[in-house]
Structure formats: C-alpha cells, structure tokens
Amino acid sequence: MATEQAQSGAAGVTEGQTKAQEVASQAMAKAQEKAQDVRGQAAERARGELDRRSTQLGEQVTSVVQALRRTGEQLHGEGNRTGARAAHTVADRAERLGGYLTGSDADRFLADAEGFGRRKPWLAAGGGAAVGFVVARFLRASAEGRYRSSRQVRMDSDAPLTRAGYEEQLPPYDTPAPGMDAGRY
C-alpha cells in the first residue's frame, strides 16, 4: 500500500512538473512573440524617421544647389570663369546627392552601405573608426559638462546663502552695528 501511494505521489509530481513546464514554455513563447513585435515596430519607426530626415536633408541640399548656381552665374558675369566652373561642378555633385537623399529609402541606404563595405572594406572600417572617435569625443565632452554642472550645483548647495556684494556692506563681527550697544550682544 505504501508503494502504491509513493507511485501515485510520484506520478502527481511528474504531472505537476510537466504542467509547470508547459506553462513556462507558453509564457516564454508569448514573451518572444511580444519582443519580435516590439523590434518590428521599432525598426519600422526607424525606417520612417530615416526616410523623413533624408528627404528633408535632400530638400536642404537642393536649396544650397540653387545658391551655388546663382553664385556660379555671378562669378561668370564678373569674368571669373575658374570660380564659376568650380561652383557649377560643386552644384552638379550636390544636386546628385540631393536627388539621392530625396529619392532613396532606408532599404536602399542600407544596401548601398553594405555594397560600399564589400567593395572597400578598409575604407569602411576607417570611416567607422572615425565616426566612433567623433562620437566618443562628443560623449566625453558632454559628460565633462554634466560633471562640472553637477559639481557646481553641489558646491552651491553647500555654500551659505549670500547676496553678491552684501558681504562688503556688513561690519566685522566684533563691531556693533550702528545704533546698537556693544553690551547688548
């Protein structure tokens, strides 16, 4: 009889373990599905933002192109053909860049970056290192600024409350104020 109870108790534990594992695996699957949904939403937002920003940048480059063309025409009118040619060359290249930025989407940018990395890996690595260096300098500078400002706030909170220039108007501690008797201190 004791053997039967032990076997039925062991079967109950095994069933409980199996049920707990099933619940845990279902919860894990739901969490993974939710994480994939969040990743997909974030990627879609990033793509949309990249498309919007690149279009804005392309429009700004186009306005710079117009200014360069006017400058080139003005230089040409003044007889400076070399400067005019340089302005028109820069305007032509900037116009191509503006068209690329305006007409491309995130997938094309990514494909072009991958293609560039495959064609010129050392240049891509050097560009990545340069960008990393610039970002590190920026972060360091902003961290130093935050450190200085937080340190100044701490120093200000430890300092006694005074008004600028008020200290010079006060008499020394050992002399009585005007109209006060020295014995009344």
Image: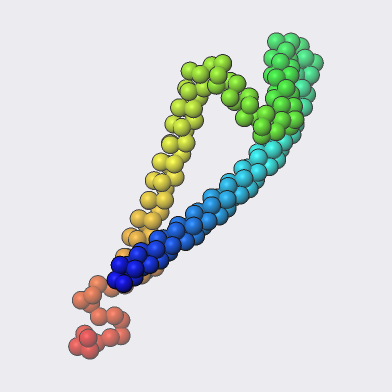
Q: Is residue 3 left or right of residue 115?
A: left
The x, y position of residue 141, in whole percent, is 42, 41
Q: Is residue 148 left or right of residue 24?
A: left
Taking depth in this image into account, of 21 and 122 the one nearest to the observer is 21
Q: Is residue 47 left or right of residue 177?
A: right
Residue most extreme to the front: 1
Residue most extreme to the bottom: 184
Q: Is residue 20 visible?
A: no
The x, y position of residue 49, in whole percent, is 66, 42
Taking depth in this image into account, of 32 and 150 the one nearest to the observer is 32
The x, y position of residue 56, in whole percent, is 71, 38
Taking depth in this image into account, of 88 and 4 the one nearest to the observer is 4
Q: Residue 67 is drawn in which quadrant? A: top right
Q: Is residue 178 visible?
A: yes
Q: Is residue 114 above or below residue 89?
A: below
Q: Residue at x 57, y 50 (%)?
A: 33
Taking depth in this image into account, of 52 and 182 the one nearest to the observer is 52
Q: Residue at x 70, y 19 (%)?
A: 93
